[in-house]
Image: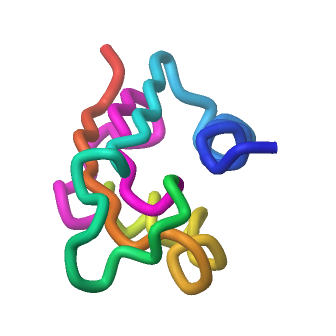
Amino acid sequence: MTMVDIITEKLTKELTPASLEVINESHHHAGHAGSPGTGESHFRVKISTSQFKDKSRLQMHQAINQVLAQELKDKIHALAIEAKAAE
């Protein structure tokens, strides 16, 4: 299972998004300091969920980081987040 699959599965299960896109951006960072060179270290998440209604940007990011805590600790070097409440 790829890291994109793992991120998608975990966010779908925990946050039931109306829309979700997980993009592997690791190829843009190959060779820079701190990059593990695995090809699965830098990701962008675009997510919209009703669970983010009345949540601040910080609270949305914290929720995503909590769901992906183990991956952020062990495998993900960088995670860009674009989050919003679903209409």
Q: Position of residue 86 (x, y in %)?
A: 35, 21
Magenta-span inclusion, residue 15: no
Q: Name the side, left or right, on which 63 lies relative to 74.
A: left
- The quadrant in which residue 33 appears is bottom left
- Quick one: 31 or 61, which is closer to the camera? 31
Locate residue 9, reporting x and y percent: 73, 39
Residue pushed farthest front? 31
* 69 left or right, relative to 27: right
9 over 56 or under it: above or below:
above
Of residues 45 and 3, the one drawn nearer to the viewer in this rendering: 3
Front-most of residues 70 and 2? 2
| Quadrant that contains the C terminus | top left
* Residue extent of the magenta highlight: 40-59
Residue 50 falls within the magenta-colored stretch:
yes
Q: Residue at x 46, y 68 (%)?
A: 37
76 or 29, which lies in front? 29
Residue 8 occupies which quadrant of the picture?
Answer: top right
Residue at the (44%, 25%) spot, across then down? 21
Which residue is at 51% across, 75% downward? 72
- Please state if 60 lies on the left or on the right of 74 as rendered: left
- The residue furthest right is 1
Considering the image in quadrants, where does the N terminus appear?
A: top right
Left or right position of 40 against 86? right
Q: Position of residue 34 (x, y in %)?
A: 30, 84
Q: How is the image coloured?
A: rainbow
Residue 69 x %, y %:
57, 76
Position of 21 relative to 55 (above/below): above
- Total labels: the figure holds 0
Task: Identify the image quadrant of residue 52.
Answer: top left
